[in-house]
Amino acid sequence: MPEVLTAPLVVEFPFTRSLGPVQSAFLTGLRERVVLGVRTADGRTLVPPVEYDPVTAEEIRDLVHVGFTGTVTTWAWNPAPRRGQPLDTPFAWVLVRLDGADTALLHALDAPGPDAVHTGMRVRVRWAEERSGAITDIACFEPYDGDDSQVTVHAGEFEDPVAGIVAPARLDYTYSPGRAQTAFITALADRKLVGERCPSCHKVYVPPRGACPTCGLATSEQVEVGPRGTITTFCIVNIKAKNLDIEVPYVYAHIALDGADLALHGRIGGIPYDQVRMGLRVEAVWTDGARYPDHYRPTGEPDADYDTYKELL
């Protein structure tokens, strides 16, 4: 049995979002070292501000300048900060109700250890040296015994207001393909495509998952499939992906490999994108040193009859 593989995997998708007037004022205020909340019709002050009352759904626009100090309402210690977190040394995640606010703001508290943190402790904002109009303009909170309870009405008007932000979304984890997919990946190194057959319904699944998705039974019998197959359906890609050296437009397709009962996807090459069609017969193309097919190209065979692949759509 081959060694089970593992590999680090990063899923990252930064996206740009626009800001309404309330969120724009809040983030622009942070850039100017001002913390703004929004006041509801019944007199509550919400920090961070929202544009609609979470209780009544009423639109709210009345901005309030609250204090830089506040009280910790709850907390959790973070002994091992991760990439992108506010501090690179152990710190506490805290919910802080700023003076003049009725709700709490989540941020980091710079403290020497968990014994130095408690619910009810007083803290204040530590501003970042360089500010751009983001929640990170508050570098963190720090313990503080004083009081800065100024609460004043604020127009929310600033020069050069922040209109949008880029929100990074990233997940780092270690992926293990398991026994069945490890065997599949290992076979690819020998330019073989290997699936597994269900002992009950006898369908062959590729890539294998270690169990039949229909019967729920474990699969272990390996079956070599392909390398030829039939395009069951496809899409034309018109947007160039970052770090992918493929000119657009190009085609990605679901391909039912000969002998398999599940279609897998692959890029189609060797044919103009507007000539790709359902039923087209294709074969795997390998490049030197590659561990998987680079793309699939037409074999020159007649197109497959629809009835031979309709169940795999």
Image: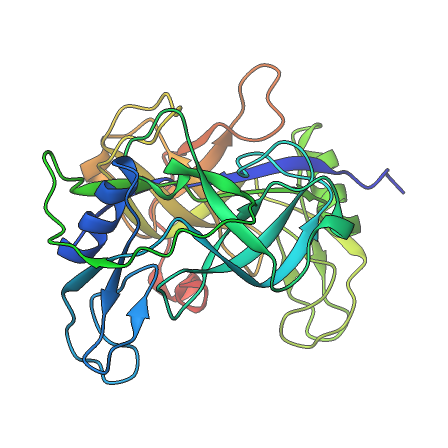
Residue drawn at x 81%, y 58% as measured from the top left: 220
Front residue of 223/50: it is 50
Measuring from the top left, give residue 1's x and y in whole percent.
90, 43
Residue drawn at x 56%, y 55% as measured from the top left: 122
In the figure, 144 relative to 287: above or below?
Answer: below
Measuring from the top left, give residue 84's x and y in whole percent.
53, 35
Q: Residue furthest right?
A: 1
Front residue of 296/280: it is 296
Measuring from the top left, give residue 249's x and y in whole percent.
22, 32
Front residue of 58/6: it is 58
Residue drawn at x 22%, y 58% as measured from the top left: 152
Q: Residue furthest top?
A: 288
Task: Indicate left or right for 275 with 295 as reference.
Answer: left
Residue drawn at x 40%, y 63% as measured from the top left: 313
Task: Indicate left or right for 269 with 180 as reference.
Answer: left
Q: Quadrant of residue 83?
A: top right
Measuring from the top left, give residue 216's x and y in whole percent.
71, 75
Residue 231 visible in this rendered orientation of the protein: yes
In the figure, 110 relative to 41: above or below?
Answer: above
Task: Indicate left or right for 75 with 80 as reference.
Answer: left
- What is the number of callouts on the image? 0
In the figure, 20 relative to 191: above or below?
Answer: below
Front residue of 105/242: it is 105
In the figure, 105 relative to 294: above or below?
Answer: below
Residue 133 visible in this rendered orientation of the protein: no
